[in-house]
Amino acid sequence: MNRAPVGIFDSGLGGLTVVRSVVARLPHDDIVYVGDTARVPYGPKSPRTVRRYSHEILAWLLARGVKAVVVACNTSTAHALESLQEASSVPVLGVVDPGARAAAQATRTGRIGVIGTVGTIGSGAYERALRCYRPDAVIQQRACPLFVPLAEEGWFDHPATELVAREYLAPWLTGGIDTLVLGCTHYPLLKPLLGRILGPDIALIDSAEETAISLASLLANRGLEGPADRVPSHRFAVTDEVARFREVGARFVGAPLDSVDLVALTDTE
Ligand code: DGL
């Protein structure tokens, strides 16, 4: 089983930030990544639809013999994690809990901000997770939907992105929080810009990094890490637009994506 791949999925490209962190933590593990590029974005969609899409991807990954699944998409995690865990024969990990845990550890004052998609913020998933670790936390949340297309465009440090960020982050420019959870796959790409705007007194919590740490310890605890002599394979499957995924994805991962295939998740496609 330790030679089996890790499955990672997202609504599209953004989950590649999680892939980047997982590759750094687990350099000997195979990865199969699914990006549902035909149906992205999940952020504005209903919980029911996001759950249906997420279950289709889980079934596809399980059919490929994965040893664990990482739901890299915050919106999928927020709406579907529990039902995916119930349906899965292998461990399923989301991005919300690791990010919330890290934020609870980082905060000094207990005043924590959360940014994410409309779906993630509306679900209250981060708020619930943060309260488990820090019941007295004062939590302020804000949906920042425009960050997703700006990051997809590669405008990680662009004047337009800065303008939008200053608008979204305005309530926190004069204080109010000491920790901000980047609760969306795409936001870690904007971290240098957000850090510059918010200043050094606000800790930025990157769920991608925290999730990779959680995955590494889950695999280590179960003796499931890839063998150390292994040159891993990283395969990417998308539901639409291979060429765009390859091009923009390379920017997300920081290296060319060699193996990208177009797949159908269900028999009806
Ligand atoms: N992957 C989504 C998330 O982390 C962002 C993109 C989308 O809306 O599908 O919430």
Image: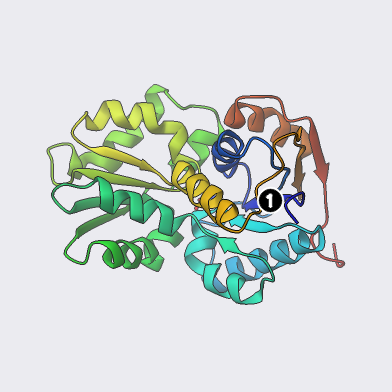
Residue that appears at 50% across and 59% down: 75
Q: Can residue 269 be seen from the camera position used here?
A: yes
Name the quadrant containing residue 63. Answer: bottom right
Q: Nearer the viewer, residue 255 or 268?
A: 255
In this rendering, the answer to whether 204 lies above or below 183 is: above
Q: Name the residue carrying label 1.
A: 6
Local SS, label 1 = strand
Residue 169 on image: x %, y %: 26, 41
Name the quadrant containing residue 45. Answer: bottom right
Q: Left or right of 111: which side holds 66?
A: right
Q: Left or right of 144: which side holds 167?
A: left
Q: Can residue 72 be seen from the camera position used here?
A: no
In this rendering, the answer to whether 161 lies above or below 224 is: above
Q: Left or right of 95: which side holds 232?
A: right
Residue that appears at 39% across and 65% down: 125
Q: Is mark 1 within 8 Å of ligand 1?
A: no
Residue that appears at 67% across and 68% down: 55
In this rendering, the answer to whether 33 lies above or below 141 is: above
Residue that appears at 61% across and 31% down: 253
Residue 242 on image: x %, y %: 78, 38
**Rendered-image quadrant of the N terminus:** bottom right
Q: Nearer the viewer, residue 228 or 92?
A: 228
